[in-house]
Amino acid sequence: MAIEHLSADTSADDIHEIIQRDGCVIIDQLIDRDTADHVAHEMARHLDATAKGTDEFSGFETRRAGKIIARSKTGRDLISNPTVLGVAAKALAHATNFQLHVTELTAVGPGSAPQVIHRDQWAFDLFPFPKGFDSTFASMWAISDFTEANGATRVVPRSHLMDDQLRFDPTDAEAAEMSAGSVLLYTGSAYHGAGGNQSDSVRFGLISQYTLGWLRQEENQYLSTPQEVLDTLDEPMLRLMGYQRGSYSLGFIDGGRDPIVAVRPELEREPHAEISLDSFAKRAS
């Protein structure tokens, strides 16, 4: 079955409804092409300095440059896009909160072979999460046009409802063809992988994944962003990065203090101001 496309003005509720059904969806032209081009411009020197992958999974003809928050002001806008965060909040609503998991600009070069079809939540040491449970939620932004020929991400629709540890051939998955500025959203349990690039051009995509607040992040956000950049970020971005408690009793410092005090003391709140013991108890009951 094909991956459904929705318009940029679709509500988070309606997008989430498709996500629940199919495990994936494409939002067309959520940003304009100029914005996508600006991300590519800001990340160009970092990609140039990045080596190609050294194994089949990372891609022998693929470059992956991370640390988007530290390196791309425009990329930060994509990471904190209100539509994407609104859907992520619904997709990961089974936890107290969620946080940024990994950010990466991928450049799939000509001749790149298809990536193995996988689930993102296998990153958690292949832990056998229950069927239907999602530990991550992902956005793949088309920084250039995504076509089947140039290696568009391939997804198996409705595979988020299937058993774990399944094996698929790339031809079992649908190519997420979309124009630059569009975004593919998919759950951590949706089987997917980068397509093979049979064209003569590079396919650029920006990955921004989110995970439950009580799980370890794939990309270490605390070590990826220097203090001089942290000083310029607003409070919502800092908390999205992980400078917040993951639940009532996870992530505090110094006997219960707000973890944001470690980088921006002026933003400290009262202990447990965001997550009350009452709300914690209700979730546990």
Image (cartoon, helix red, strand yellow):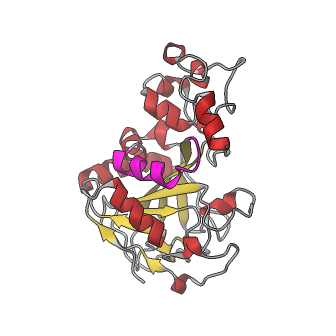
Given residues 249 and 278, the one toward you in this image is 278
**Residue plotted at (41% across, 60% down):** 16
**Magenta span: chief secondary structure:** helix
Q: Is residue 216 magenta?
A: no
Residue drawn at x 57%, y 55% is 136
Q: Percent x, y for residue 279?
A: 58, 34
Position of 72 relative to 152 (above/below): above
Can residue 176 be seen at all in this image of the molecule? yes
Quadrant of res 60: bottom right
Of residues 229 and 270, which is closer to you in this image? Answer: 270
**Considering the image in quadrants, where does the C terminus appear?**
top right
Residue closest to the far top: 266
In this rendering, the count of numbered labels is 0
Q: Can see residue 109?
A: no
Quadrant for residue 284, please give it: top right
**Coordinates of residue 181 in the picture (x, y in percent):** 30, 58
Residue 107: x and y in percent read 47, 61
Q: Is residue 160 left or right of residue 140?
A: right
- x%, y% of residue 257? 64, 19
Quadrant, the N terminus: bottom left
Image position of 187 with respect to 103: above or below? below
For image coordinates 53% across by 27% down, the residue present is: 274
Q: Nearer the viewer, residue 142 or 96?
A: 96
The residue that appears at 64% across and 60% down in the rendered structure is: 121
Left or right: 160, with 150 as reference point: right
In this view, 210 is above or below 121: above
Q: Nearer the viewer, residue 37 or 90?
A: 90
The residue range painted magenta reads 81-96
Q: Is residue 85 above or below residue 279?
A: below
